[in-house]
Structures are given as C-alpha cells and as structure tokens.
Image (cartoon, grey):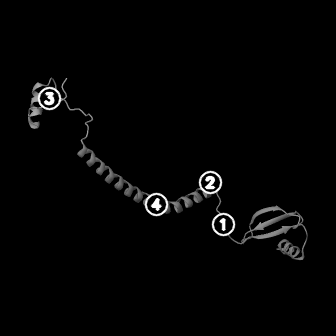
C-alpha cells in the first residue's frame, strides 16, 4: 500500500483521479497531522482563546457577585416571611415590662399594650422583695 497516490499529478487534479478510481466516495472525519506552520498558528489561536476565556470568567465572577448582592436581601426577607407563615408569629423589637409575681414565684413579661408575652420562674435574687417591686405588684393588682 502506497502512502501517496498520484504524486505526479497536480494537487487540483488528484481528487478527480481518486474519484475515478475509487470503489466508493463518502464523507468521513479523521485526524490529520499538522505541519510546523499549522501547529504554530494553532498555538497562537490557543493563547488568544485562553486570554479571552480568562477575561470572560473574570467578568462572570463580577456579575455573579453583583447578583448575589441583589439576591441576598431578598432571600433573607423570604426566609423571615416563611418563618412567620410557618409559626404564625412575627418577631418584634419593642420595650417590654418585667413584673415580679412573688405570690406565684414568677417573673411576667408584658408588652406596651399590657399583654402577657412570657413568663418564667423567679431567680433566687429576684425572690427578695424590694419596696419598688412590692409597689408595682400592688398597682398591677389594683388596676
């Protein structure tokens, strides 16, 4: 088997001779060796592609960070709203009032509308009656 056919015919006419002598003609994909000039051209193209890809990746990182900055507050609000729906409660920050109920041994916490929002057992330090706490309980009990 010869490595080169129709070497004595011009390059333009080789395809015609090959077709005239072939059993069958079909399109096929195969690997063809590169010569030095083609290899150098592909190396240059490779470098250019690497630079372009790097540039676009840098831009992509900036855009992603920008979107993260826009999405983050929305995600926090989303989670907070979901939690309110699940628990049927909202988190509020306001002044609360702790009133000791020494008869029951409890510290009761009220919001500014006078609604009980929580209670706990008195600590040992809180069990000691003070003049102030006694007055508060009297006022609360009389009201």
Q: Is residue 19 left or right of residue 131?
A: left
Name the element at disc 1. Answer: loop
Residue in view at x 58 percent, y 59 percent = 81
Closer to the chain start, of discs 4 and 3, is 3
Q: Say which quarter of the image contains residue 11.
A: top left
Q: Secondary structure at mark 2?
A: helix
Q: Check disc 4 and report the residue beneath it.
A: 67
Q: Position of residue 142 (x, y in %)?
A: 85, 74
Q: Pick the quarter of the image with the C terminus.
A: bottom right
Query: Considering depth in this image, is 93 or 9 the residue closer to the camera?
Result: 9
Separation of marks 1 and 3 at Cα, in angstroms: 89 Å
- Which of label 1 and label 3 is nearer to you? 3
* Mark 3 secondary-structure assignment: loop
Instruction: Give the mark toward the camera: 2 or 3.
Output: 3
Camera-near label (2 vs 4) is 4
Question: Contact, CB < 8 Å: mark 4 with mark 1?
Answer: no
The mark nearer the N terminus, 4 or 1, is 4
Percent coordinates x, y for residue 32 in the rendering: 25, 36
Q: Name which quarter of the figure residue 18 lies in.
A: top left
Of residue 113 and residue 46, the one placed in the foreground of this image is 46
CB under 8 Å between discs 2 and 3: no
Residue ID for mark 1: 92
Left or right, 110 with reference to 73:
right
Q: Which residue is mark 2?
A: 86
């Amino acid at each position: 088997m010869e490595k080169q056919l129709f070497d004595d015919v011009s390059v333009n006419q080789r395809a015609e001779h090959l077709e005239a002598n072939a059993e069958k003609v079909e399109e096929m994909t195969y690997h063809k060796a590169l010569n030095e000039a083609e290899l150098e051209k592909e190396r240059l193209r490779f470098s250019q592609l690497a630079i372009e890809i790097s540039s676009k990746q840098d831009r992509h990182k900036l855009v992603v960070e920008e979107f993260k900055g826009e999405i983050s507050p929305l995600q926090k609000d989303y989670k907070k709203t979901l939690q309110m729906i699940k628990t049927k409660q909202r988190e509020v920050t306001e002044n609360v009032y702790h009133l000791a109920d020494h008869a029951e041994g409890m510290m009761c916490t009220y919001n500014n509308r006078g609604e009980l929002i929580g209670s706990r057992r008195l600590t040992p330090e809180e069990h000691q009656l003070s003049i102030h706490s006694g007055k508060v309980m009297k006022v609360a009990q009389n009201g």
